[in-house]
Image (tube, rainbow, N blue to C red):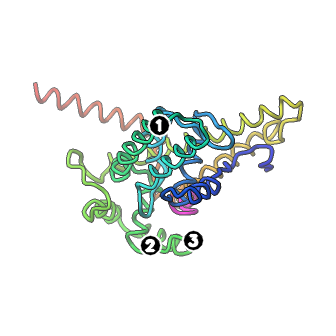
Amino acid sequence: MNDEDLQLIPHTRAADLLSWAAEEGYEPAPEAAVRAVLTLLELGDGRMHDGFPELSSPVVEQLLYERMYMYVQPGEEPEAYGRAVRLLIDHQRAAKRLNAKRHERLHAEAEWQGELLCGLLRQPHLVTWPRLYTLLLRADGVDTADPAAVRSWLDAFRELTQEQRLAAFGALEESGVLDRVEVDSGWGRDRSMSVGMATDGARLLLENRLMQRSYRNLAGLNALGKPMPAELSGDFEGFETAVVAEALRLLGEWTVPGLPALLVQEYADLAPEPDAAEIDAYLAEQEQEQEQEQDSAE
């Protein structure tokens, strides 16, 4: 797999942005947060200029309010993502790509959206399996930088009963790691289905964005009359495999390295993702229950 041709792996200018911020005396942001922000922006619909994403109000809202919570689980400083966006806004202003009025407005929006993101990251009904297991690993004091320790914990967790696993999920709310939602039935089948669907949807969206990025870069090869990479001229399955692997790698970078791949490939029983038939059956059951409730009310 030739990444020089496919250009699947995002190469952000996080180090350059942080170096500039240090030189100019701006409040720093953790490199991991800056890299996540730049990567998701690069994989979005916004324009790029000189290797940096161009920000606008819709782009900032899409990133911080609609997409970021699907992927990241910070160990600390969830507000760092909003701070990273504000650094990028300051960089655009310094490069004379924003006037003072737009700079001030975008800065305020990024601060507000960053605060909203902190709340979204605490909502149990919005987590994905990688994010949820990241929280459990940290709560149990596992060294998440040690693949053997992560695998050992997963093996032990697999030995628990279903009731014990659900209790472990619920303990995250009891301890305050996640907010408690009083209006739903807690950690049961409904919540597990929701988490599974969210996980599948988030990963597929990321894979699609990676494919789109690769296609945009390949347009340049076509314009120069160069041949298509083998992965797209006869081995498309190889291209799809590479996309899936890169998506899982990025998901691990934003949670625990290697964890998303383990949950898909070796521990799928701990992180079930319902297929279309299961989703249809579940929705049909929900609809039937609602009809019965309405009939009872009448």
Query: Which percent across, then down, holds residue 115?
Result: 36, 48
Tell me where residue 227 sits by quadrant.
top right
Residue at the left extreme of this rendering: 298
Instruction: Identify the residue under disc 2.
Output: 156
Q: Measure the alpha-carbon separation of dots 2 and 3.
A: 14 Å
Q: Tell me the element at label 2.
A: helix
Q: Amino acid at mark 1?
A: Gln
Q: Measure the alpha-carbon separation of dots 1 and 3.
A: 33 Å
Question: First in sequence: mark 2 or mark 1?
Answer: 1
Query: Which percent across, then down, holds residue 276?
Result: 48, 36
Q: Amino acid at mark 3?
A: Pro
Instruction: Identify the residue under disc 3.
Output: 147
Q: Measure the alpha-carbon separation of dots 2 and 1.
A: 38 Å
Question: First in sequence: mark 2 or mark 3?
Answer: 3
Magenta region: 255-262
Figure check: 147 above or below 185: below
Q: Residue at 80% of width from left, 47% of height from top?
A: 4
Q: Is residue 256 magenta?
A: yes
